Image: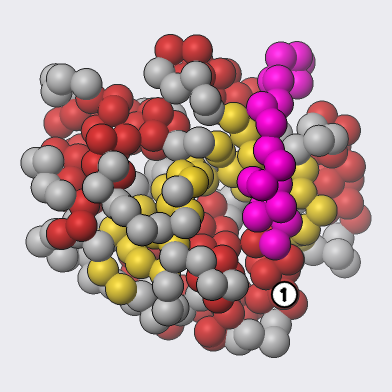
Amino acid sequence: MTVLAISNQKGGVGKTTTAINVGAALANRGQRVLLVDLDPQANATSGLGASKDSPNAIYGVLLKEQPITEAIVTTPVEGLHLVPSGPDMAGAEVELTPLMAREYRLRQALRGARGYDTVFVDCPPSLGLLTINALAACDAVLIPVQCEYFALEGLAQLLDTIEAVRLRLNDLLEILAIVLTMEDRRNRLSEQVIDEVRRHFPKLVTRSRIPRAVRLAEAPSHGLPISLYDRHSSAAKAYDDLARELSARLKSRAPIALGGAIA
């Protein structure tokens, strides 16, 4: 079982959209996939048609040591399961602070999630204890970066956090890839951002890029991934290509040094 955290402390970069749609694409390719919604906003939960008010959710797993198997629900995609989030997660950061081994709560819980090929953890847009839990539990990190101005803003802080977690909490942690999202090929700025990110991270940036698309933006309101909402769309193809590329990276992955990436 491979555990991947999808993280970027900036909001609105396509993090949850990527978690849902890469997970669905891998499930469509025959994998058993679990998506853990660690974000108090619970967008991955609603984006897969699940209730934000479930009594069995990630809050109980982290704060009450509820078995993770009791929190897992099905989704419209065969082979893709979900651990939902909800409003009670809003205070989880504070409630975790005094607990013993607070950084390892998710890692411990995931030991009970047997039978999955890949686990995705959709992190909140911050670098607090919830994200630290994800980084301490995962094998690698996938970082969505939007093709917009200030794309690299805050990325240095995220990389520093990942390196600190690797040194202190999870020495196997590595960055799997950076995926460029919200690409608008009609916009010259998108190409400039792509060139800049690739200049800083030539080995990390995926070939597959996710387009800005109306159908992709509509899909979560129907509780569906793009592969079910509009499987012939450019976004569905892009996520299928990304899933294939990430699978290949996982099979041949090696740790990538971060030092000096951003001045």
87 horizontally vs 158: left or right = left
Q: Looking at this view, is 3 or 186 the one in front?
A: 3
For the stretch drawn in magenta, the main secondary structure is loop
Residue at coordinates 55% horizontally, 37% vertically from top-left?
140
Magenta residue check for 249: yes
How many other residues sit within 10 Å of disc 1, few (<14), some (14-19) or many (≥20)?
some
The image's colour scheme reads secondary structure
Say whether residue 262 is visible. Answer: no
- Residue 134 pos. (x, y %): 39, 36
Q: Which residues are magenta?
A: 244-263
Say whether residue 237 is visible. Answer: yes
Residue at coordinates 30% horizontally, 52% vertically from top-left?
113
Name above or below for residue 262 compared with residue 56.
above
- Residue 223 pos. (x, y %): 40, 78
- The residue that disc 1 covers is 237
What amino acid type is highlighted by mark number 1? Lys
Q: Looking at this view, is 49 or 189 the one in front?
A: 49
How many numbered discs? 1
Magenta residue check for 226: no
- Residue 184 pos. (x, y %): 79, 63
Residue at coordinates 70% horizontally, 62% vertically from top-left?
244
